[in-house]
């Protein structure tokens, strides 16, 4: 497990975006080999998405051969509602990059048979070859996706009733009115995310500090579902300084001492421009008389 500690939210967002960029480019995706990326919603990943859009617009990154699977979606909220996760992903990310819409998979919270929709989502992930990198965020109570406290740590994609803490936290997106916040959602399970070959979890802000403490310094506990990722072979937690406020000083010092090593994951920062140059050079015929 790696814990990446940056000074501010913007730096944490940029580190995460650089990591995703390098992972996609090093994977070398193409028509026969898509990079599969799990994605979250909410305010935490917005800075990361903005940097990824910037990389695309600068010609350094392409999502043409990337397939995405989103973590969750509200039940009963129209797809075109401004707070649906379909709308969120389109407005904040997908419409700004070159990803093909048919390669973006988001659960349908208005499906006639919700459990069948969840089962089909699991099958789509399998058909895509599994998730290469699952990016997630957490709530102040340590839930990942909508795997609320008490969720099974081997759970699969399913219908979930939202905890009151989550409804209160999300009310800010619905004019502060609790009655407007959906009470149910479709969500990938903890087990679904654990199946990914790599997991990166973004945790920023002092209000997430106790959850980070539970995730890092205490044992695995289904009341703090993010703690399950202690047992994943390749987990990267990316946080800002504020999120470390509940950690022991020696814990913070230990992980900060590893930053010289961990920063090698994003430095050098790769670009598809370099890949294209390599291809053009290798395709040139050798000189002959």
Image: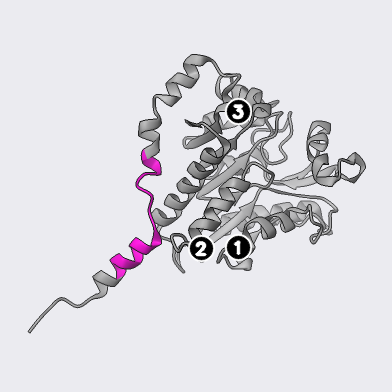
Residue annotated with mark 3: 227
Residues at marks 1 and 3, CA–CA distance in whole angstroms: 33 Å
Residue annotated with mark 2: 57
**Residue 212 picture location, percent across and down:** 60, 26
* Circle on res. 96: 1
Nearer the N terminus, badge 2 or badge 3?
Answer: 2
Q: Is residue 69 left or right of residue 27?
A: right
Residue drawn at point x = 76 percent, y = 55 percent: 116
From this view, report whether residue 119 is shown above or below residue 195.
below
Q: Secondary structure at mark 3?
A: helix
Nearer the N terminus, badge 1 or badge 3?
Answer: 1
Give neighbour class at mark 3: few <14, some 14-19, many 20+ (Cα, 10 Å): many
**Residue 6 picture location, percent across and down:** 50, 32
Determine the image quadrant of residue 33: bottom left
Whether residues under marks 1 and 2 lie with C-beta atoms below 8 angstroms apart, the answer is yes
Residues at marks 1 and 2, CA–CA distance in whole angstroms: 8 Å
Report the number of discs.
3
Give neighbour class at mark 1: few <14, some 14-19, many 20+ (Cα, 10 Å): some
* Circle on res. 105: none
Magenta highlight: main SS: helix
Residue drawn at point x = 72 percent, y = 52 percent: 118
Give neighbour class at mark 2: few <14, some 14-19, many 20+ (Cα, 10 Å): some
From this view, report whether residue 178 is shown above or below residue 61.
above
Looking at the image, the residue that sits furthest to the bottom is: 289
**Residue 260 picture location, percent across and down:** 36, 32
Q: Is residue 183 left or right of residue 138?
A: right
Residue 33 located within the stretch drawn in magenta: no
Q: Please provide the residue range marked out in magenta.
A: 264-279
Residues at marks 2 and 3, CA–CA distance in whole angstroms: 36 Å
Q: Secondary structure at mark 2?
A: helix
Quarter of the picture holding the C terminus: bottom left
Residue drawn at point x = 43 percent, y = 25 percent: 256
């Amino acid at each position: 497990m790696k814990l990446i500690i940056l000074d501010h939210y913007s730096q944490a967002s940029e580190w995460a975006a650089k990591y995703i960029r390098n992972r996609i480019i090093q994977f070398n995706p193409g028509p026969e080999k898509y990079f599969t990326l799990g994605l979250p919603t909410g305010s935490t990943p917005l800075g990361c998405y903005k940097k990824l859009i910037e990389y695309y617009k600068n010609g350094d990154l392409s999502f043409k051969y990337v397939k995405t699977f989103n973590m969750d979606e509200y039940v009963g909220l129209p797809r075109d509602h401004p707070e649906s996760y379909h709308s969120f992903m389109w407005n904040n990310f997908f419409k700004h990059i070159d990803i093909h819409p048919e390669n973006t998979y988001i659960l349908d919270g208005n499906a006639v048979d919700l459990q069948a929709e969840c089962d089909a989502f699991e099958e789509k992930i399998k058909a895509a070859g599994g998730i290469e990198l699952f990016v997630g965020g957490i709530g102040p109570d340590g839930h990942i996706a909508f795997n609320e406290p008490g969720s099974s740590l081997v759970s699969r994609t399913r219908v979930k009733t939202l905890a009151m803490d989550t409804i209160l936290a999300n009310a800010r997106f619905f004019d502060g009115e609790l009655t407007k916040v959906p009470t149910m959602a479709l969500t990938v399970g903890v087990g679904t995310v654990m199946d990914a070959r790599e997991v990166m979890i973004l945790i920023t802000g002092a209000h997430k500090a106790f959850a980070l403490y539970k995730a890092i310094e205490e044992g695995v506990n289904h009341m703090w579902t993010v703690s399950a990722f202690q047992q994943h072979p390749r987990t990267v937690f990316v946080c800002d300084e504020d999120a470390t406020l509940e950690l022991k000083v020696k814990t913070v010092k230990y992980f900060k001492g590893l930053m010289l090593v961990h920063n090698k994951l994003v430095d050098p920062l790769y670009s598809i421009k370099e890949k294209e140059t390599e291809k053009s050079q290798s395709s040139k015929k050798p000189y002959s008389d």
